[in-house]
Every structure is written in structure tokens, then in C-alpha cells.
Image: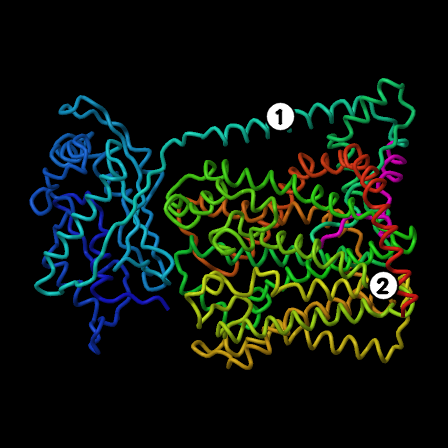
Amino acid sequence: MVVFSVNNCVLLAIFSVSCFAEQTVNIDLRNIGLPVYISKENTNETLLFEDFLKYAHGKYSSLSLLKMEQFEIDPTLTEVTGHCQSDITFLRSNTNDSLVTTSFYKYIDATAKIPQGILQGKWNWVGDYQECYDIDRLRNPNTNKSFGGKYFSAGIVINGKPVLMNTFPLVVGVCLPSSCNKTDVVTLLNQLIAFIKKEIAPVFPIKQDITVYESISDGPKDLGKDAIVMLVIIGLLCFIVFVSTLVDYLCSLSDKEMETLVKDDSAFDDSHDDDRTGLLNSELFSHSIQEGRCPQTKRKLLKVCRVFSVLSNGKKLFGTATAVGPLACLNGIRVLSMWWVILGHTYAFIFAVLDNIAEAEKLIQRFSFQPIMNGTYSVDSFFFLSGLLVAYLALKEIKEKGKLSWPYYFIHRYWRLTPLYAFVLFYYAYVFSSTISGPLLFFLEAGNYQNTFDVCKTYWWTNLLYINNMYPNYGNLATTCVGWSWYLANDMQFYIVFGPIVILALSYKGRVKHLGVILTISLIFVGVVVRGILVWYYGIYGGANGAATKHKDDPWGENGPLYGRPYARYSVYLVGMLTGYVLSINNNRIRLPKITALFGWCVAIATGLAVIYGQFYYNRHTGTHMTLVQSIFYNSLGRTAWGMCLAWVVIACVSGNGGPVKDILSWQVWAPLGRLTYAAYLVHPIIMYTYYFNMRQPLHFSDMTMVYLFISHLVVSYVVAFSVSMLVEAPMIQLEKLLLQPIGTFANTCIAAPCGQLLGKIRTRFNRGS
């Protein structure tokens, strides 16, 4: 529950009455619907708030907060521009003019009033943004200049701290003449607060320091050079894709030949795939382009155009005919995990724009909300899938070819992830804020979000080097660039560090063939122990995102000791690699007795439920939490246990013991959606921010509202994901074979082959010595 003291609440309520209340208007504060009881700060006394409102109404029945008789703008304030003062005076002193009076009432109406539901967390009092800007322009004869309405959002803090949940300030919308600026608003409102405190001090002294610390206006934005460059790049890519698609269409083969082309070109076989991350579908696009029977000139043109053609790439993306195989269940796990991420973020990102946060906070007590609250385990599903594909595909290639192209192993992965990642990153850094307008713009320009833009413009290179989960700001997700990309940094680090070590260890033959399994299990155990030590050292009593209660001055603890740290998350990745190894050595031919399969499903289901609902009791009973020992057990084992549950699901499906679970997860519809998972992951938070911060009024939480928002975010995210995939991702994958294969050939000849020979000699001597 959100609690305001009497003094704070009353002051803020009186302050929020229209800055342009007409002199003869009596505002009945008793009828505005404020809660009846509020505890008075620092006393045991409970005050009937309605009685105080009667007192306030009797004393200030005709109060206009900018009324000439009671509150005058200090003419000595140099911070207030002359035109702003003159236009305010003109509005208040010409009430006999019908045109001025009409506009005057609109200024009153557009400015925020005392709302209902303050104690439910209605801390964002926006007024009416559109009405303010629709006010007709007036000419002030004193300045000989015209002015219209201009909307400002002002943030208020008490004793230098946010009013609500120690996170959000009280935000008040004010409609003033367009001649006023942000500095004028801050100065005038601070003077107004001082006036009110002085007026009510004899009855209700207010000791708190209540300050307007920031004000922003939603005016025309000047695009910087970087934003213009980004828009030019987007326009150029759109033009290239459009022309290429048109040429491809005009020069394409017959429908029958095109179907054959797509079938041959997008054939899916897990054993020939090089995509090794949980977000990437293992059959996204092929590495070959059929040239058909076109004439030589057209063939060359078509070959280039198909790299960028939506027609060609789109048909490959939506193909489902060959999306089958023993590992087809991975498509369903990938897509459903992505939906789980979007569902969790739909709730997580909405708190800044809600007008009843206290009601939304009750969600954590619901049994049905626990899977959403623990949606962070969906990311562990991606870690598991990534590790599985890395080990499975690499070991299968070593088995078939006797070697693995290590230069291509690293180059391909960076090429596969980075272009689309960089595109989204620079859009977010330079263009995104220009797409936001309205009263909620305050949170982008004056809140923590603005810090993320600044970090993006300065430290974008840390994202492209995949170290942003550690630097800058010690990897704080709230202040790093594209905060949700912490997953990409972790996954790339696992791929580079653990991938080669575990693959080489698991590929050993002879007397040490089990060395890799022992090493992998040992590393998993170390990962579990590391998490337990971190929980103990920092005194973490919560779940996935529990905050440190000890060593809070340690920047690593202050900025999240568990969630985004690679040393605290890698165990699930290795569980996936071990699963991929089991599938590889058995060639996906695993046979399990029925009793073993039944026991496996019982253990997996029970473990999964324990992970997801492990904190339900403490969430249900507000104010309680796990003991430190319980927290160590839950936090150290939870994520690894979740990976083991997924390992069983995959093995059960491959072995023929999946039943309806296999049928659902192997549904062919998951294949095209799975190919868009990476793009959807990158763009969906921007989709949500764009919608939330462009709203003209705060959002009122309800279950039905959240259902519609989730479905909307899901659909729009995939539509945008398809667009950016056709614009950037698909062309870059097609270009890979033109640019990276020659590099890979050179690297294999000049680097990999000599190193492989040396490694073979070392391995031979080691085996003889054994």
C-alpha cells in the first residue's frame, strides 16, 4: 500500500488544484474522493481527513493558486522570463473579454487537478495534454506577441527522494502560456509551494522539503546528426530491399520452379546448421542460392537481389514443410519461452505509467501470477537451448568431418548476432526518444531512461563487444544501454569461453573419453556453489532479482550480484551442452523403459513446479521472506534445476516418451515463429516503451487490460521483428556466404590446419602416455 503523511498529501493535493482557478469558482475539496483516513506522520494520532478538507475549504474556498490577491509572482525573480509573467498577468486581468475568458477556462481545465485514488498510487497527475495544445492563440498587447497553450510535466520530490516506492516522483501536468519555459515552471511552482506552506503553517506545519526539481515540455525535437544518419541508413535499406524485391519478382522463375527453389534452399537438417544460440532458430536461412534457368545476366542480377529480396527471404522464413526431425521440439520451447519473456515484460515495464500501482502490487500474492513473476526462468530456457545446440552441432560435425573449423566457429557467431543487434541499438540510442510525445515523456527526459540513452551514445562499443553485463556501471541493467541485451553478452561469453573447452573435452576418445563429462559436471557444480556463496555473502533473501542486504556499498552487489553476472548464470548453459552431448553420441536414438519415463516426468514436473512456486508462501504473506539457508538452497539450485527439467523434456521427446508434449512442441507452426525469436527479443521492449510512453493518460491496471496488452505486444513485436529481419537480419545471413566463406577457407588453411596438426600430435602422445 502506498502511504502519504497528512502534511505531504494535503500540500500536494492543494498544490495540484489548477494554477489558473477563476476567482469566483468555489472548489469543494470534500467531494474529490480522497481516502478518508491517513496516518499523521510521527504521531499515533489518526486524523479524519475529511474534517481537514472542510477546514481547508472554509479558509481557501476561493483560492486561486495564481490569484492576484493571494499569490503574486515575485517581480524580482530573474529566473522567470518577462514574457511569461506578462502573459500570465494578461490572462488573469482580462476576464471581461469573452475570448480571453474562454481560453482562461481552458488553461484551468487542462491543468492537473486533485485526482481520486492517491493512496492507490495515482502519482501521475497529467491533466489534459491535448486540450492544452488546442487552446487558441491570443495576442498580448503588452508584448505585441501571440501565445498559445504549452504543456509542462513537473516532477516533485520530498526531502530529495521520490514520493512513491522510492522510485517515482509525483508528476504534475501544468498548462501555461507558450512564452514560459521549463525554468519558469520550476521557479513558479517552487515559489507556490513556499507560499502554501507559509499559509497553512499555523494549523498544519510542514517540515518536509517539498521541491519541484525538474520540468519538461513536449516541444518540437531537433534531430541530431547521428539520428539523421540512422534515419538515412534505414531509408537506404528500405529502398534497397524494395528494389531487390521488385527485381526478384519480375525476374523470378515460374511458381513451380520457385517452390522447388524454396524447398531445396531452405531444407532443414539440424546436423548441417551453424546457428548456436537459444534465441536463434537452427534453420533460419540457407547458405546456398539456386540460380535456376535464367539467362546469364539475369542470373547474376537475381543472385544479388535475392540477398535483399523479401519475396525470397520471406518464403524461406515461412516455410514449414521441412521443419521436422528429432529436435523439432526445440522450436516450441524457443517460441513459448519468447512469449513468456514478452508476458513478463508486459507487466514489468508498465509500472511507470500506472495510476493504481498499489492494486497492481497485490498481484504477487496470487497463485496464478507466480509463473509471470518468475518469468526470468524463460531466459534460462534460452541458455539451455544455446548450450544444447553448441555441443550437439559441433560434436556432430567433428564426428562426421573429424574436425571443427574454429575460425568459422567464432566469426560466424559474431556475424550472425551483431548486425541486427547494432541496428536496434543505434535506433534506440538516437531515434527512439524522438518517437515519444505527450505527458509521459517526462520519464524519458528526466528519469533513468535518459541515462540509458547517454550510456548508449558513449559506451555503445561495450554492447558490440558483448561486455555490457560487466561494464559500464558494473552491468546495472537499469542504467546500461539496451538493458535487456545482458542476455546476449552472457550467451556470447559462454560461447567463447565454455564452448571450446567443453567441446574439446567431450570430443576426446580412448581412455579419457569420459573426461569431458566429468569436467562439465564439475563446472556445473562449481556454478551452483558460486551462486550459493554470492547469496550468502550479499545476504540475498529474495528470489531471482533479490537485492543485497549486506555489503551494499560494494558496487557489484549494489548493481545486481546475481542476475546478469556470467559467473552466476553459466550452469544452465552447461546443462544444455551436456544434453547436446548425450543426443550426439546416441544419434538421437534413445530408448527408455516406460517406468523410467514415467518416473522422469514425475520428477521433472515436481521440480519445475517447485522452482516456479518455491516462493509463493512468502509472496502471499507480505513481510515474510526465506531464511538465509533457504535462500541459498533455492537460489543456488533453482536455475540449474530448471535446465535439468528442460533436458528431460528434450530427451523424452527424442526417445518417443513425450506424448502430447512432443506433439505440441513439435507443431510446425512454431518453425517460422522460431526464426523470428532473435529479432522479437531485440525489438519487443522498444515496442512496449513506444506504446506506454505515448499514452495521453496513465493506464489503469486490470486483468482484462493486461490480457489485451499482452496479445497486442505479442502480435506487434512479431510484425516488427519480421520487418527488421527482412531489412537487416536475412540480407546479412545471405551475405555471409559471399564474404565469410573465403575468410573461413583462408583461416582453415593457414591457421586451423597447422593448429589441428599440432593438437593431434599432442593428443596422440597423451594417449600413448596413458
- Residue in front for this viewpoint, 382 or 661: 382
Q: Residue at x 57, y 77 (%)?
A: 632
Q: Residue at x 56, y 46 (%)?
A: 462
Q: Residue at x 91, y 50 (%)?
A: 401
Residue 7 screen position, x and y as percent: 20, 64
Q: Quadrant of the C terminus?
A: bottom right
The amino acid marked with disc number 1 is: Leu
Is label 2 in a helix, a strand or a loop?
A: helix
The amino acid marked with disc number 2 is: Leu
Taking the magenta stretch, the answer to whether it contains residue 368 is no
Instruction: Give above or below for 433 relative to 124.
Output: above
Q: Quadrant of the N terminus?
A: bottom left
- Residue linked to disc 2: 583
- Residue linked to disc 1: 236
Which image quarter: residue 187? top left
Taking the magenta stretch, the answer to whether it contains residue 263 is yes
Instruction: Give above or below for 721 relative to 169.
Output: above
Residue 610 screen position, x and y as percent: 64, 76
Is label 1 in a helix, a strand or a loop?
A: helix
Which image quarter: residue 491? bottom right
Bounds of the magenta segment: 258-278
- Residue in front for this viewpoint, 101 or 637: 637
